[in-house]
Image (spheres, helix red, strand yellow):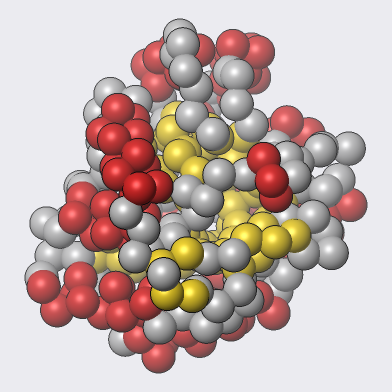
Amino acid sequence: MTTRPSVKEQPLALVVAVIASRADLDLAGQLRKPPDLFELRLDYFCDSAADLERGLWTLEAPLIITARHPAEGGANNLSAQKRRELLLRFLPQARYVDVELRSVNAFRPLLARARRKNVGLIISFHDLNSTPTVQSLQLKARAAKSCGADIFKVATRTDSPAQLARLLDFVTNFNIDLAVSPMGVGKFGARSRRELMRYGSVLNYAHLGRGHVSGQPSLSEIRRWALAAAGARPRQRRVRRSPRGSLSVTKAVER
């Protein structure tokens, strides 16, 4: 059974380094100071899963596994069956599994197995074309919670000030007892991620050499942001454990 760190051991803003290529895997294994988590983008390794398995021993941080849906930025146009097979193959090594809200029904047996193994559940939503309304994002967050999510991850297009404002409004008015990991992509992607880290984003993603989406910071850059956020956080989320021992968030309180 996978054992998660206790809440006292969990930093408020976790840094996640994305592994989406063999070069990323090699760099990850050489890090003197690993991030809090690595995300394995299994959709990029659909034809080299065995190579990825052999390289996992070099990684010195827990793993998030995901095989992204093609409609939400997934690579190689994988079928649901292929994505399910990849997730099941790497589930024994996972601390968290990330599936899209749209994929929950198709992956229910997989998610039940993850729950039995005490693997945390990230339910995600990616809109690479726009940022939906605050009301729409709130509905998706509530749906994720009803599906048993430990964390709701949301990534949206932030090419305009209006799109950025909507994403920030979603977070600053978030009143659901659920950990949230919001981020923008595009012109204002980097700015959104830095601001959202300050407002309590629990998972903050970085690349290991080459960004996979516009606005994704490097590992060194996001660590600088994390230090700044720790010293100047405008509000703090109180993190506690759900009955399954994973992250949840109470309403933010102003400092």
Quadrant of the frame with the C terminus: bottom left
Whether residue 82 is visible: no
Q: Residue at x 27, y 59 (%)?
A: 195
Quadrant in the picture for residue 20: top left
Q: Residue at x 62, y 44 (%)?
A: 10
Whether residue 121 is visible: yes
Q: How many marks do you count on the picture?
A: 0
Query: 204 or 22, which lies in front?
Result: 204
Quadrant of the frame with the N terminus: top right
Query: 48 or 193, which lies in front?
Result: 193
Q: Residue at x 73, y 40 (%)?
A: 5
Left or right of 203: which side holds 215? left
Q: 250 above or below 135?
A: above
Q: 66 above or below 138?
A: above
x then y, percent, for residue 48: 53, 22
x then y, percent, for residue 187: 11, 57
Query: 226 or 92, which lies in front?
Result: 226
Left or right of 191: which side holds 93? right
Quadrant in the picture for residue 232: bottom left
x then y, percent, for residue 142: 58, 82
Q: Residue furthest bottom?
A: 135
x then y, percent, for residue 87: 67, 43
Q: 241 above or below 175?
A: above
Q: Residue at x 52, y 51 (%)?
A: 12
Query: 53 or 253, which lies in front?
Result: 253
